[in-house]
Image (cartoon, grey):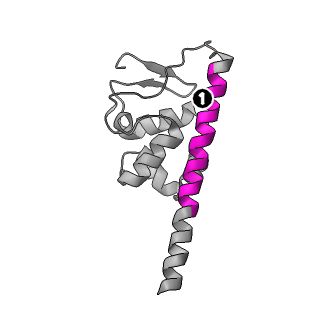
Amino acid sequence: MADDILATDEHDFSEDAATFGDRIVAARDAMGMTSAQLARRMGIKPATLQSWENDRSEPRANKLQMLAGLLNVSMVWLMSGEGPGMRTVLPGEAPNGDWQSLIDEVRAIREAQSELVLRTRRLERRLLALGT
């Protein structure tokens, strides 16, 4: 993994020099999401995500798990750069159509799961408020 590089229009991403925030940005870019879109999907303020991406703070464990799921990477890779991370995409490389459709389906399921977690938490808070 240490030799993998993701080339983007804005900069080159190198696993050797990447920080936690760099890995978030690179994985988010690889997913084709803006920071505003990712923040909305996570149910956090854009400033919170910006703070993570700029290495000023780190998410709690539950948010880290959600972040990894939405970005389709492992929590360990996000935190340390070790283990399964982003698939390296080389310039001019096009993924296999069947493979891509499966990845898209997995991502859609993960997004739906994240939304269900948020809905469940909201309902739980409402139930707790009714009980007090």
Count of numbered tags: 1
Residue lying at the far bottom in this picture: please name it: 132
Question: What percent of the width, then of the height, locates residue 28?
Answer: 53, 37
55 relative to 90, above or below: below
Q: Is residue 33 visible?
A: no
Side of 50 where 15 appears, left or right: left
- Amino acid carrying label 1: it is Ile
The outermost residue toward the top is 92
Q: Residue at x 43, y 52 (%)?
A: 63
What secondary structure is the stretch in magenta mostly built from?
A: helix
Q: Quadrant of residue 126?
A: bottom right
| Residue in the image at 55% along x and 24% along y | 8
Dividing the picture into quadrants, the one containing residue 99 is top right
Does residue 128 appear to the left or right of 17 in the view shown?
right
Residue lying at 37% horizontally and 20% vertically, measured from the top left: 1
Viewer can see residue 14: yes
Residue 102 place in picture, x, y as percent = 62, 27
Q: Is 19 within the magenta? A: no
Residue range highlighted in magenta? 99-119
The answer to if 107 sits in the magenta stretch is: yes
Look at mark 1 in the image and give the residue it sits on.
Answer: 103
Image coords of residue 92 (percent x, y): 62, 12
Residue at 59% across, 45% down: 111
Q: Is residue 3 above or below residue 75?
A: above
Q: Is residue 61 above or below residue 72?
A: below
Look at the picture and state if 106 lies above or below 127: above
Around disc 1, counting alpha carbons within 10 Å, would you say few (fewer than 14), some (14 to 19), or many (20 or more)?
few
Q: Nearer the viewer, residue 87 or 8?
A: 87
Asked which secondary structure carries label 1, the reply is helix
